[in-house]
Image: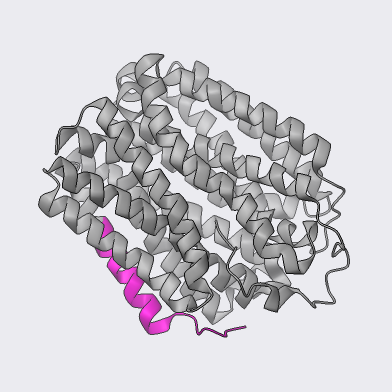
Amino acid sequence: MNESATGLTDVVLHDPEKPDQRSSPAWGAVISLALGTFGLVTAEFLPASVLTPLAHDLGITKGAAGQALTATAIAGAISAPTMAIITRRLDRNIVLWAMTLLQILSNVLAEVAWSLPVFLTARVVLGIALGGFWSISAALAMRLVPSHLLPRAMSIILTGVSVATVCAAPIGVYVGEIWGWRAAFMIATVVNAVTLLVQLITIPTLPPVEVATFRSLLDVAKNPTIRVAYLVVLLVASGHFASFTYIRAFLEKVPALDIETISLVLLASGIGGFFGNLAGAFLAEHSLKAVAALPPLVIAIAAVSLLTVGASALASAIAVAVWGFAFGAAPVGLQTWTVLRAASKQAESAGVLMAATFQVAIAAGAIFGGLLVDNAGVASVFAYSAVAMFLAALTVFLLGPKQRET
């Protein structure tokens, strides 16, 4: 999630309720959070890149294998508010270390999984780590650097997402083809171990400053601006992940690309996401509504392109790359709109709800996508994505944020 747009400091810079606002930046801790986002995003979406060999090895359908994403998302949705309340009096560095340990456990279980239940258990453990991490990450960023450096800090932290988007899918495809899909999870385990070491060294003491309760979460959810934003998150995330999980299956079947070409297409999508992230931050300086509405609209156009001209290898490659660019920009507007603008004084509670909503949307998209793939063919998920993304863009245009909303 990207909150690096200029203007965020308007809502946090002079907040007297920030008792531990730092006078000097803790860049080592910021980098360790970037490593955390990289490991999480890499592990979360590895199943999509190794879907075909994973399903074959475990003796299940591709639709059933795709439900690994669902298991992670459901666990993440439950974990976000639950972990926030359970750990509300713990130092936040302890919480971060615990979430990284859970990532390591998840990837080890996935690597040795001999059946679908074992693999799904691994993904549930990852979901717990994912919900706990994302629910506090934005709020912690405010405490690691002086407020005027917050945009730069968030850019660094979310570089982990961008790099994982670039690397995870193509490397997963390549490693899965050469050494087997289990090797991809072994590599993710090593990344997690390095991340934990860096976090142990760099994360400072961060006592909780906002005690999360169900009441505080409900208070944030009553904000009408945030309710609209979460509706858009549901549409965008479900529309994206209903089809993202099966993008390899689509490229194998419709334009009939080989493994090497699929790896290059996914790499192009990831690179597009990296530059989309930068473009979204730039656009947010000028129009928050535009940066929230244009990405889903562009994704809708890309989905329609795959449905209509997807048999062309070039057209499919361009559509997937454009999709990646647009989805890279999407979180900028959504996170700026909610966590750091509409609810800046309750940033951790807003982050909890954002994480939970995002994971619910991923689960819904993956479940529906799996049903569509198994019963109507892989192309059907892109029709759903086009509809969901168009509705998201329309909702933002009609009910979205004003440029100076606080």
The coloring applied to the image is: one colour
Position of residue 13 in the picture relative to residue 222 (left or right) = right
Position of residue 315 in the picture relative to residue 289 (left or right) = left
Taking the image as drawn, is residue 214 in sight? no
Q: Quadrant of residue 95?
A: top right
Percent position of residue 71, x then y = 46, 39
Taking the image as drawn, is residue 139 in sight? yes
Q: Quadrant of residue 338?
A: bottom right
In the depicted structure, whether residue 97 falls above or below residue 136: above
**Does the magenta portion include 394?**
yes
The magenta span reads 385-406
**What residue lies at 72% left-to-right and 33% top-to-bottom?**
196
In the depicted structure, whether residue 105 falls above or below residue 24: above
**What residue lies at 73% left-to-right and 64% top-to-bottom?**
149
Please state, as top left, top right, bottom left or bottom right, where the C terminus lies in the image. bottom right
**What residue lies at 58% left-to-right and 52% top-to-bottom?**
158
Percent position of residue 291, x then y = 44, 71
**What residue lies at 37% left-to-right and 59% top-to-bottom?**
326
> 336 or 364, which is in the foreground?
336
> 356 or 327, which is in the foreground?
327
> 374 or 404, which is in the foreground?
404
Classified by dominant secondary structure, the portion drawn in magenta counts as helix
Please state, as top left, top right, bottom left or bottom right, where the N terminus lies in the image. bottom right
Percent position of residue 218, x then y = 63, 71
Percent position of residue 356, x then y = 55, 56
Position of residue 235 in the picture relative to residue 343 (left or right) = left
In the depicted structure, whether residue 177 falls above or below residue 267: above
Q: How many marks?
A: 0
Position of residue 11 in the picture relative to residue 396 (left or right) = right
In the depicted structure, whether residue 68 falls above or below residue 301: above
**Does the magenta portion include 73?**
no
